[in-house]
Image (tube, rainbow, N blue to C red):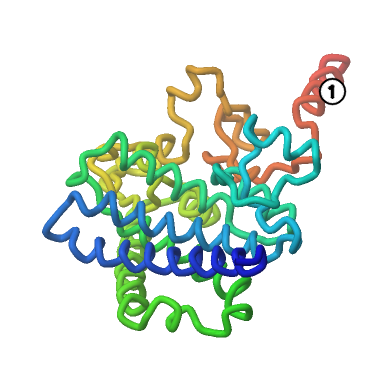
Amino acid sequence: MSSQENIETVKENLLENAKISIQLGMEDYKLTKNDNKRKISAIRNIFSGLILLYKYKLILISPKDKPYIYITAINSKVTKEIYDGTFGEKTPTNTVDVHNIKKNLKNLDIRIDGNLLNFINKARNSIEHFYHTQDIDILELIVKSFLLIEGFYEDYLKNNLEMSLKDFLGNEIYQLILENKDIYDKKLSECHQSFTNIEFPDDILKDIFIKNIECPYCLSHLIKYQSGDYENLSLHCTYCLNGQCLDKYDVLGLTHHTIKDGGDFREECPECGEYTIFLDNICLECAFEKDPDKDYERENYLNYLLEKDD
């Protein structure tokens, strides 16, 4: 078999394995209603399928004489190949990890949602290591993985493969994904609707709140209002059982633990005078929007000197 025939076989196998992984993941997900252990294999298979699609594309756009240059992990095993100029020519023993896949895609001007990929990868790892499977609902991970798969396929694979994602995955699996996406969208809408019980100081704070909240334990965005006013909110995560009594600083990633560990984000608001936190340059107490180019501390000091002279 020639090297060109070999690489074509590798590409076909990668693509087929990506498809099978996603299909198996969705079939596992269907079985999670009666078998919690299937949750781990479901998200593991779907995530694996996504990663294989990335690697397929990286091989697809590699130089013909070095088809593995973008998927080969750089370590001591390939030092000689790097120096003699043959790096990327042979089938790799170790392939790139998620971090380097992101890096290589970015360098090749292939755009993916890196933050969403990080979220899924981190949550997947947490499920495999730290959670009891009966305590979590993996619907959000399934849906968000699909968003990455769908976006990447439409933008970077559809033209090469000359088929829709529905045809690639099969109609049954594709429809199952869409059904679960609708379920997730409904759950997320219910969570957002629960925030109408909160009287925010300003509508912009509600928008910032919805945009930034996530469970500090599982990173889910399915956070629901429980009780209390804006100053004393009690929220809970509908995704995991750990986040059952959260305050607004918990879900914004600004807990007392963060402050205690040296991450004190608080500062005096020039408008309301509260020692508070700014998100997206907006005061969480009064919704004052801070000019990021303005030095308020220096301005206050100069005003103090002027008043002192008077």
Q: Is 185 drawn above or below residue 106 in the view shown?
A: below
Whole-percent x, y for residue 270 in the image: 67, 33
What is the residue that sits farthest to the front in this orientation? 1
Residue 84 left/right relative to 44: right
Which residue is at the front of the view, 225 or 138? 138
Q: In terms of depth relative to the viewer, which is nearer, 99 or 77?
A: 77
Please give the name of the residue rendered at 30% of the width and 40% of the height, measured from the top-left corner. 234
Q: Amino acid at mark 1?
A: Leu
Left or right: 260, with 88 as reference point: left
| Rendered location of residue 89, percent (x, y) | 70, 52
- Please give left or right for residue 203 compared with residue 30 in the image: right
58 to the left or right of 256: right
Specify the quadrant that holds the C terminus.
Answer: top right
Local SS, label 1: helix
Q: Position of residue 120 (x, y in %)?
A: 44, 50
Q: Give the quarter of the image for residue 55.
A: bottom right
Along the line of sight, which residue is nearer the eye, 17 or 218?
17
Tell me which residue sits at (65%, 38%) in the image. 74
Q: Residue furthest left?
A: 34
> Residue at left 18%, top 62%?
31
- How many numbered badges does the structure rendering display? 1
Residue topped by disc 1: 302
- Within 10 Å of disc 1 (Cα), the crowding (few <14, some 14-19, many 20+) is few
Indicate the quadrant containing the N terminus: top left, top right, bottom left or bottom right.
bottom right
Where residue 8 sits, quadrant-wise, is: bottom right
- 113, above or below 254, in the image: below
Q: Image point 31% across, 41% down: which residue?
A: 128
Q: Nearer the viewer, residue 305 or 283?
A: 283
x, y percent for residue 226: 26, 47
